[in-house]
Image (cartoon, rainbow, N blue to C red):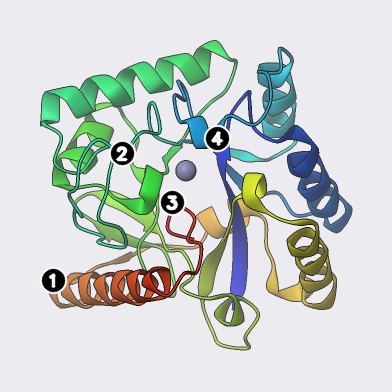
Amino acid sequence: MKTAIRMDDITPDMNHAKFGRVKAILEAAGIKPLIGVVPYSRDETLRIEKPHEEFPKMISELERAGWIVALHGYHHLYTSREKGIFPINEFSEFAGVDYDKQYVMINEGLSQLREWGLNPIMFMAPGHTFDKNTLKALKANHITKLTDGFGEKPYIRDGMTFYPISKKRSECISDKEGFSTYVLHTNTMTDRDIEDFECMIKEHRSNFISYDEYMSVPAVQRSTFENIKEYLMAYAKHLLVSKRASKGTVIHQDGK
Ligand SMILES: [Zn+2]
């Protein structure tokens, strides 16, 4: 498997020390990830430090170096209990919200990122949840790429190109044919997680690719049958995570 990396929950008030450690690992390996930047974060769980003033400069330098920027929601607050069309979680900032509101959230979010000097070319839904109106509102805002879905290569659905994410770590470093995305939430990574991540990258360097390489893979058209299969797989993943949560395992709210 060739695996790209995405980093969620990038905000001015994130845990900059942990972000910096993961950034150093990626830079040493020469891997450029996708980063999901929240334009107007109001999520208390993402508020780790005082907002860093140099945040826009730091992120735009990474973008100039080849990192890819995604719009990661609006406030990053879950206001709906809808699962949408990729039902990994039973909460959403977008799924179930009416079209006009979603359009404004995406439009204002993109403007904020551009004000920071960034060039967002992709969408990353908080909690991985979105619906058909999200796709429509993204297209109306000229965003036609999205990080989510399951599959072995990029695919086209409803006029959008989806870049699938991985269901599990073992899949990312397997010898299987195909492409995937390894999802990282640096804010909640422990020292051990960061060390493990560094070991994984070192041991399996040939499995990992930069995100722009993933974006250069030709996308295939999705059939309705495959959409249904993906929906069922995502729902099965949701049930599995809910079952683990009920047994006391801490689950990150992004559905890690
Ligand atoms: Zn998030």
Q: Residues within 10 Å of mark 3 (few under 14, many from 20)?
A: few
Between label 1 and label 2, give the one nearer the viewer: 2
Q: Secondary structure at mark 4?
A: helix
Which residue was labeled with disc 1? 224
Question: Label 2 vs label 4: CA separation?
Answer: 13 Å
**Kind of residue sitting beneath label 1:** Thr
Between label 1 and label 3, give the one nearer the viewer: 3
Looking at the image, which is closer to me, 75 or 99?
A: 75
Q: Secondary structure at mark 1?
A: helix
Q: Secondary structure at mark 3?
A: loop
Q: Residues within 10 Å of mark 1 (few under 14, many from 20)?
A: few
- Say whether disc 2 or disc 4 marks the residue closer to the N-terminus: 4
* Circle 2/circle 3 CB separation < 8 Å: yes
**Kind of residue sitting beneath label 2:** Tyr
Which residue was labeled with disc 2? 78
Q: For the residue with label 3, is its CB less than 8 Å from the closest atom of ligand 1?
A: yes
Which residue was labeled with disc 3? 253
- Say whether disc 1 or disc 3 marks the residue closer to the N-terminus: 1
Q: For the residue with label 4, is its CB less than 8 Å from the closest atom of ligand 1?
A: yes
Looking at the image, which is closer to me, 65 or 85?
A: 85
Q: Residues within 10 Å of mark 2 (few under 14, many from 20)?
A: some
- Say whether disc 4 or disc 3 marks the residue closer to the N-terminus: 4
Question: Label 1 vs label 2: CA separation?
Answer: 28 Å
Question: Label 2 vs label 3: CA separation?
Answer: 10 Å
**Kind of residue sitting beneath label 4:** Leu
User: How far from the left and from the top, in percent, is residue 96?
Assistant: 14, 41
Q: Quadrant of residue 72?
A: top left
Which residue was labeled with disc 4? 46
Q: For the residue with label 1, is its CB less than 8 Å from the closest atom of ligand 1?
A: no
- Say whether disc 1 or disc 4 marks the residue closer to the N-terminus: 4
**Kind of residue sitting beneath label 3:** Gln
The residue sitting at 24% across, 38% down in the picture is: 94
